[in-house]
Every structure is written in structure tokens, then in C-alpha cells.
Image (cartoon, helix red, strand yellow):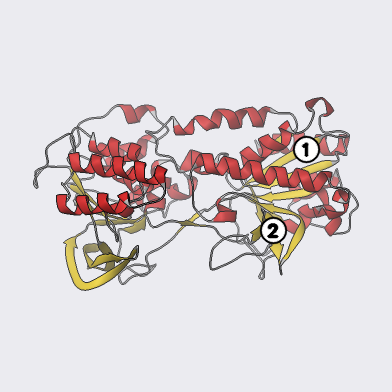
Amino acid sequence: MFSTSVRRFGASLTTYAPPMRVAIVGSGPSGFYAASRILHSFDAQCGTGENGVDIHMYERLPTPFGLVRYGVAPDHPEVRNVENKFDEVARDPRFTFLGNVQVTGGADVLPSAAVPIPLSCMAPYYTHILFAYGASDARHLHLPGTGPDGLQHIHTAFDFVQWYNGHPDAHTPDAPFPRMKGHDLRHVAVVGAGNVALDVARILLRQCKSAPKDETLQYTDAPQPVLERLRTWDVESVDLYVRRGAAQLAFTNKELREMLNLPHAPCQPLDPAHLQQALAEVGHSDNVSHKRAMTRLLTQLAKGSKTPYAPDHTPRWGLQLLRSPKAFYGDKRVRQAEWDVTEVRDGRAVTTGATETTPADLVLASVGYRSQPLAGTSPPPVPFDSQRHIIPNERRRVIRDGQPVPGMYVSGWLATGPVGIIVSTMLDAFGVADEMLTDWHAPDGKTRTLCASVGEKEALSGRVVRRLAANRCR
């Protein structure tokens, strides 16, 4: 696949000298939506020649689509339908996908399966570069019992999601889940209560040993070895621990409805007084759409699950509100979790001083995603805010020392942090594409490009293919 792409890539560069040549780093929704917008802004009859455009998308993995492929739960195929739109983009002759290629900050990068291409080698060959590689790392808890030298069976929900979605990084010889024995994974603690946390809980409850046989997952993208491994897990309970109250729950009504409708896994009822208090709190919100959505969500929770709850029912699940993780205990692996009992003050969770200890055989932390800078070379050639974990930007133009870097742009979670859904990602990508086009068509647009910033009047052609294949720079 890589060699074919390189041949096609080389043919486009040697035959034409397009006025606008764009490199997109990352092949998730943000990158594809931006590519679509740019392609539709040019007359396709011009191709990659005069007044045309050429787009090359670089991806570290062999396959495209990012979190749409590896982050969306396999039993949510409707969310993955956007891949059909991305397939249309990929079929455009002005677009080239280069998988198994890692754009880096320099040559000092640890060996991996992907071919490393330093950014400095790419710059002369493009007028614009868009960084759209998203948030490819998970936030960790950093509590007693966690970390590289901590207890076993404490992982991020991100790792678990990648495993059941077949991500290559989750199926290496040293990956934890393919080797995990499930005969005593009775109590699972999920830290967090967003949609990812509910996805994790739902997959566990649908596929564990005590669940009725479910053939529908066999016809999804979930790898068969994963489904077979999950079938050996003796899961009795899955509890989601939330540091704030019901009024601050982050998952959507659709996700909650799926959980409450599980015919074999009842939900532990919440305190009616707490739900009434939450409804009153939500009622004071000035955000009409938020008020409406949260009222529906709290009403669903008040009605409870389709199956009546019993404390000894297997499997079962519950929301443990006003609980924040404090520490984890065990021998070599986790056996117990200690939680701070919290209360909400001015929208924030603060500890009351009380604690609670519960059994926990597996802990999955779903506390958010974060982006990382380009691998290699310090300081990196692309600015990176290590506090907010984003590339600093202004109207999606990369900013260094308060000034825009010529020809460099950023979109999606790499620009904003991990917020929003696919629709908001699409709008953001369209916005950055429009900014790129505006800059290109400006009177001085040709002088403010990526290639011009490194001393080339226009994007070079031809020789880059040989350098890509040889993995070196001049």
C-alpha cells in the first residue's frame, strides 16, 4: 500500500507544479473534513495543475480515519457512517493517502513500524501544512497504586477501547488486555462518566461470561479474539465513579438509554432526593438546550433500568456519584479502591474528608484525552503548549512567540483540546480550511507559505519521493 501511494505521489509531483500543495498530518475526521473543504473550493477540471490543488495526507498507522475507526464503539455503526464521506475524499485524484508514515520533529526518533519523515524535509515541498493528528494519548490518574511500577489491572479506558477496536498499539506482544485472565475480574471500576465510560461499561456488560450470548457483536469490526477473551471474564458488576453529582453528568441521553435498556444488566437506582436536587439545579440554567437535554437525562435516571435491580443480580451496573479516586491497593494487582467522598461547591467537586473503600479487580480510568507534540527534537519545530496539550494557535494559524508561523495550521482536538463531537470537529475543520484558502488567495499569499518560509519561492517537486523512500534528508 505504501509503495503504491509513493508511486502515485511521485507521479503527481513530477508531472505537475500545482500552485497549492497541502500536507495534512493525521487522518482522523478533522483532517478529512479539511481536505474535503479544500478540494471542493477548486475546480476539479484543473486537477493538480495550474490553479489546482494537491493534498497529501500522512498517517502513522497503515489505515486512516483515526478515532472514527479506533475510538467509536463497534456497536455504534451509525457513527462510523462518516467513513463513507471520507472514502469519497480519498477517491479524488488530487488526494493521496500515505499510511505508515510518521511526521516527526527531527531525526532522533525511536524506531517504529512507521517510516519517519522529519518536518524540515517536508517544508520545501508544500505551500501549507495542517496538523490534525488529534489527541492520541489518555490522561492518567497519578495516584498511589498507579503508574509503571504500580499495581496490575489499572489502565485507561482509552487502552481498553483501542483493544476492542483492533488498534495495532493494543495488540502488541506486551499489551495487557490480550493476556489478561478474566476468571476473577468480578468488580470493575470505571473512573469517569462521559460517553467513553459508558461505551466501556456497555461492551463489558454485553460480552462478559454471565451475559446472554450476543451474536450481533460478531458482525462488527471488533476482532474475534477480543470477543472470545471477553467471554471468559467473570464480570459481576461495573460501577462508574463520578466526582460530581447527577447535574454534572457528561454522557448523552442516547448512551444512557442504551445502558438502561440492557435486558440482562439492571442499573442500581439513584437516590430520588439527589435526582430532585439535580433537576432543580438544572432548572436554573440559562442554556436552554443544556437544560432540556439534562432534564431528559435525569428523568431517564429517575425511571431506572428496564430490568428491576437486585444487589445480587449478575451482571449489574451503577453510577456512584460524589466519589473521587484517592488510592488503589492490592498485592501485585489491584484488589481495592479508596474513594474520597465529595460534594459540589460552585460547580467543583471538593472532598468532605470522608472516604469509602470498595472491591476493584479492574480499574479503567476514563478521565480524558490529550495531544502530544511531534516526536523527536527538543525544542520541537512546531510550538506546543505542554500545559493545555495543544498547538498554540490563533484562528487556527500556528502561533510562535505571538506571531503566526507561515504556512502552518492546526485543527480539531490538537487545536482546542478534547472537546466536542464529530459535528463540531467538522465545523472546526471547515473553518481552518477557509482560513488556509483566504491566506492563499491574499495578495501576498505566495510569500507567506510553508515553502517560502524555508527559502523556496514555490513548492518543489520530484526529489521528495526519493527522500521519502530512502528515509533521509539532503
What residue is pinned by disc 1? 54
Task: Locate the C terminus by quadrant.
Answer: bottom right
Q: Residue at x 39, y 46 (%)?
A: 290
Q: Assess disc 1: are there few (<14), some (14-19) or many (≥20) residues with their C-alpha within 10 Å of its C-alpha.
A: many
**Towards the viewer: 43 or 315:** 43
Q: Amino acid at mark 2?
A: Val
Q: Position of residue 309 (x, y in %)?
A: 12, 41
Residue depicted at x 32% and y 37%: 227
Closer to the N terminus: mark 1 or mark 2?
Answer: 1
The amino acid marked with disc number 1 is Asp
- The answer to whether residue 204 is seen in the rendering is yes
What is the quadrant of residue 55 in the picture? top right
Query: Measured from the top left, where is residue 7 in percent x and y?
Result: 76, 35
- Name the residue at the top extreme: 45
In the figure, is residue 470 to the left or right of 68?
right
| Dot 1: element | strand
Q: Residue furthest bottom?
A: 353
In depth, the one of 248 and 188 nearer the eye is 248
Q: Which residue bears the numbered disc 2?
A: 398
The residue shown at (60%, 48%) is 60
Q: Secondary structure at mark 2?
A: strand
* Quarter of the image with the N terminus in it: top right
Left or right of residue 29: residue 197: left
Residue at image location 24% in from the left, 39% down from the top: 300
Q: Residues under labels 1 and 2: Cα distance? A: 21 Å
**Percent position of residue 3, x then y:** 70, 38
